[in-house]
Every structure is written in structure tokens, then in C-alpha cells.
Amino acid sequence: MQSENLQVQIGEITLRNPTLLAAGILGLSGASLKRVWRSNAGAVVTKSVSQEPREGYSGPRVVETPCGLINSMGLPNPGIEETQKEIEIAKDAGATVIGSVFGEKAEDFADLTEKMKKAGVDAVELNLSCPHAGELSTIGRNPETTKEVVEASKDPGVPIWVKLPGNTHISSLVEVAKSAESAGAEAIVLINTVPAMAIDATAERPILGHKTGGLSGHAIKPIGLRLVYEVYEEVDVPIIGSGGIASGEDIIEYILAGASAAEIGTVISDEGLDIFEKICEEASSYLDGREIEELKGKAHQE
Ligand code: RRO
């Protein structure tokens, strides 16, 4: 059941509700994207894809800690060509699909965006922020490189969203968001996972094959909230929150900080796909007839 007051507008796209499947979670096959859509997600974001297939890092690739999950998948994906077919399956099922892409250079992002558009996506999310991808991780930390990538990608006539990092030491993250907006991004997604690691005291070794990875889950919600709050003060395009959202109350907190919608990821491993319905029901009862727009950014009022 969809309540009218859960509908949100992200630029030219209307989402039936503010919950999106986060990139990297169940987002590789058309069948799983379809399943998530049918579980009431407002939109589904694909796993981030590159021009060519990538195997990813050697394992272990995920570790559970008392604070949340740390992953170091290493950007595994079947490449854009295979992904296009999967997107078509999800689109045929009526899903609102956001294609997540990453590349080394601005031209890669431009070409991938073009191919995503051909596959029929509703928007493209430029992933400029995987926390453990060497040089690739640095694009979204810098206003100049972010601008270059957004400008190169914006022409094919599909909305461009930009996913930025959650690294707390990047003093210029607001500047990066402003730069993405002025280059033509229609939405800013905040945040990716936060750089982290786990060590096995018995083995006296890092647990992940790649040693470091990205922390997600409840522990990063305060980090995401702070960045959404700060970026909201400086940009006009919609913000999509991400990081530690597991309940209607969590999503409402992001909306009060300034988000228009939010990506849901880690909680799915504990609660399954029913979480989309649950978050919507809880958010709806909090709203009690009000529109999301009325609540957006309200935590900024004196
Ligand atoms: O695939 C990954 O290892 C990965 C990516 Br692309 C990302 O953007 N964020 C993350 O935590 N892991």
C-alpha cells in the first residue's frame, strides 16, 4: 500500500516513497532488483558498474563487527554490457531504476552514463566515493575532479546524481557538493561507507583480504546526518541520505537534517526485504498526514 504523502520528488523523478535500495546490496541481477521493487522500495540502485567486468578483491570481503559491517568487495561487477540486460528486466517490471557507475576518468563516466541511459535507467548515480579503491576513491574528495566528471557525464539527457564519501577528515566536502551541483548534478547522495578495518587478535592479522574496507550500519548514522545537515545549508538540489537507516524514525531524522529520500542497505542483511514496507509504515505514522516536504530540513529552524 502506498500513502500519497510518502511521494517525493528528486529533480524530475517522482519516487513513490523515500526509500531506495542502496548500491551494492542485491543490485546485480534484474531478478533481484525486481524483487526489491516488489518489496516496496521507492527505487532500486544497481551495484556500481564499470566498462569491463571486475572480479573484486580476494576474501574475506565482509566482516561483521559490533558496530556494523565492514566490506571490501573491491567493486566486483559484470561490466556495463551485461548490466544493461539486467536493468531492462527490472524496467520491464515497472521499477524505478538508478544505475550506479564508476570509472577511472571523466570519459569512462560519460560513456557509462550514455549506456545506462540506453538501458532505460531513470537516473545515473556517479559513484565517486568507494572508500577502498585507490585512486578512484579520491575523485569525490576533490571539487575539481568532481566537477570534471559531472560535466562530462551530464549531456545524454538523464538526471545525474553524485554519491560522495563519508570521510570525516575531508574538510571540503561541502565544497565538493557545491561543485557537483554547479556542474549539473540533480541530486547529492550522502554518504558512502566510512573507511575502517577489523583485526583478528588471535591470528594477529587484518581480517579482510584487502585489509581495510568501508563501515556501514548503525554506527555511521550520526556521520551521515552531520554531512547531510551541513550540505543542506549550502546546496539547493535534493539530498539523498544514506548510512545506518533501519527504521522510520531513522529516515525521518535524515529528512529533518535536509534529505528528501534515503538509501537503505546494511539492515537488509538482518531484516530482509520487509524492511522497506516497515520503514514506510513507520515514517507514515510519524508524518500523521503531513507531507515529507513539510519536514525537510526542519532541524535547521531556530
Ligand atoms: O564494491 C565495493 O567494495 C564497494 C563500493 Br563500489 C562502494 O562504493 N562502497 C563500498 O563500501 N564498497
Image (spheres, rainbow, N blue to C red):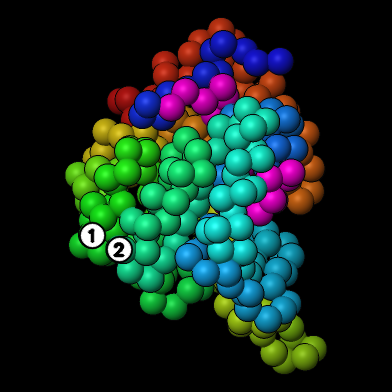
Which residue bears the numbered disc 2?
106
Instruction: Residue 148: give its label.
Output: 1
Separation (CA) of disc 2 from disc 1: 6 Å
- Sequence-first tag of 2 and 1: 2
Ligand 1 within 8 angstroms of badge 2 C-beta: no
**In the foreground, 110 or 286:** 110
Q: Look at the numbered discs 2 and 1 and tell me whether their residues touch, using CB distance below 8 Å.
A: yes
Name the residue furthest top. Answer: 289
Q: What element does badge 2 sit on?
A: helix
Residue 285, above or below 181: above
Q: What element does badge 1 sit on?
A: helix
State which quadrant residue 184 falls in.
Answer: top left
Viewer can see residue 128: yes
Three-letter code, disc 1: Glu
Q: Which stretch did the figure color magenta?
A: 13-32
Q: Residue at x 50, y 52 (%)?
A: 100
Left or right of residue 199: residue 293: left
Viewer can see residue 163: no
Three-letter code, disc 2: Ala
